[in-house]
Image: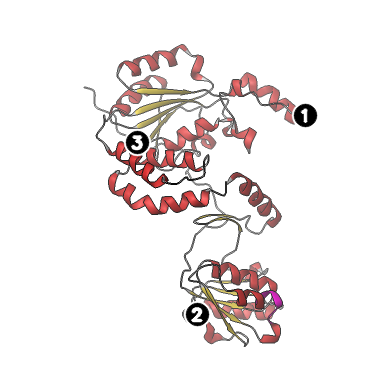
Amino acid sequence: MRALPPLQNDMRPQRVAALATLPLFWSLKRKRVVVAGGSDAAAWKAELLAACGAEVHVYAPHTELGEIFRDLIARGAAHECGRFVHHGVMWHPDIFQGAAIAIADCDEDVEAEAFFNTARAAGVPVNVIDKPAFCQFQFGSIVNRSPVVVAISTDGAAPILAQAIRRRIETLLPPAIKSWATIAQAIRERVNARLQPGAVRRSFWERFVDRAFLDTPEEGVETRLMAELERLAAPRSAIGRVTIVGAGPGDAELLTLKAVRALQAADVILYDEQISNDILELARREAKRILVSNQRGDGMVMALAKTGKRVVRLQPGNPVGAAATHEEVSRLGKLGIAVELVPGVDAAHRAPATAAAASGETCPADPAAAGGTTRAANL
């Protein structure tokens, strides 16, 4: 039996493009935070921090505490661990001791600079509202389906764009996603204990996610999920599966949703030089990418699938009608390897859409030609 060739790294550019800022999700549960100022803007930040479970210490004289802030303190925090502590004095250097972060609303740059420098000297991350020069971090627009939280940032370039993106995401995320995420938290340890990392565990969570975007969790759903877990945990053949994906004319936005799902579920992706970096960037980060020729690729697909890998063979154009594709499907089938074909957009069908876009006209989507709903039609 011929040995499987080593999985080498290719020389393509890095997988993560340049980032304006680093997105982080930071737990503030039971942490002490500082908010200086009694304005409406400061109240919004204080409410957000308390909603994360923080103990929010507010420094503002009673006469400067606005009505919205007073009502907020009277209502209390949304989070069971969050609370407000009002100190009826101006901020001073001693308030930063033990604080996780510090927020201020300052009218004058002189005060903003003083707050910024004092917080930094105390080693506390600081944000002065609406004064980017005195901010070490930023607040983005938020979609709240906690424990699912989506944050959007434009690095201060276009806040209104971030708000528009948030509204779009709000329409895409069903309210029930909150309940599904809570269920996922409840069963995560049991899933990890029964299913080893790899294709089987990923299959369980992929099916879970498919349900989360279609249904509202019904009574007894955890019991049914555990039954599915036990079924997947049962011993099975080590044979993997192969998905042959058409990349179309090379535009990542013309990939079908089915093609994107295949890339994000793959263990190994075999591709040739005609596949663009934009398409490869849609793949799961952990997936191994191997640049191959057509002749070498056929043999590697079989060898990798025999080891239990979920293999994606990424080909330009639409491989569904190619005789070579059907020959490969036949060979794999005789070996007991499951194969799925995902069509790509034909270049001939792309031209009318491109021309229509240039002229300002609309061009109706052709799902039959595209092999399914395209990302371009939905985003």
**Label 1 residue SS:** loop
Disc 3 to disc 2, C-alpha distance: 47 Å
Q: Are marks 1 and 2 in contact (CB under 8 Å)?
A: no
Residue 129 is at least partly visible in this image: yes
Give the number of the disc on residue 122: 2
- Location of residue 184 in the rendering, given as x and y in whole percent from the top left corner: 42, 50
Query: In screen coordinates, is 248 left or right of 5?
Result: right
Q: How is the image coloured?
A: secondary structure
The residue positioned 34% from the left and 44% from the top of the image is 226
Image check: 132 left or right of 29? right
Q: Is residue 11 visible?
A: no
Residue numbers of the magenta segment: 65-69
SS at badge 3: loop
Amino acid at circle 1: Glu
Residue indicated by mark 3 = 8
In the rendered image, residue 361, in percent from the top left (x then y), is placed at: 77, 29
Above or below — where is 155 with respect to 258?
A: below
Q: Quadrant of residue 38?
A: bottom right
Label whose residue precedes the other's in the sequence (3 or 1) = 3
Which mark lies nearer to you, 3 or 2?
A: 2
Q: Which mark is residue 361?
A: 1
- Residue located 63% across and 74% down the image: 72
Which quarter shows the N terminus? Answer: top left
Residue 36: x and y in percent read: 62, 79
Q: Nearer the viewer, residue 288 or 307?
A: 307
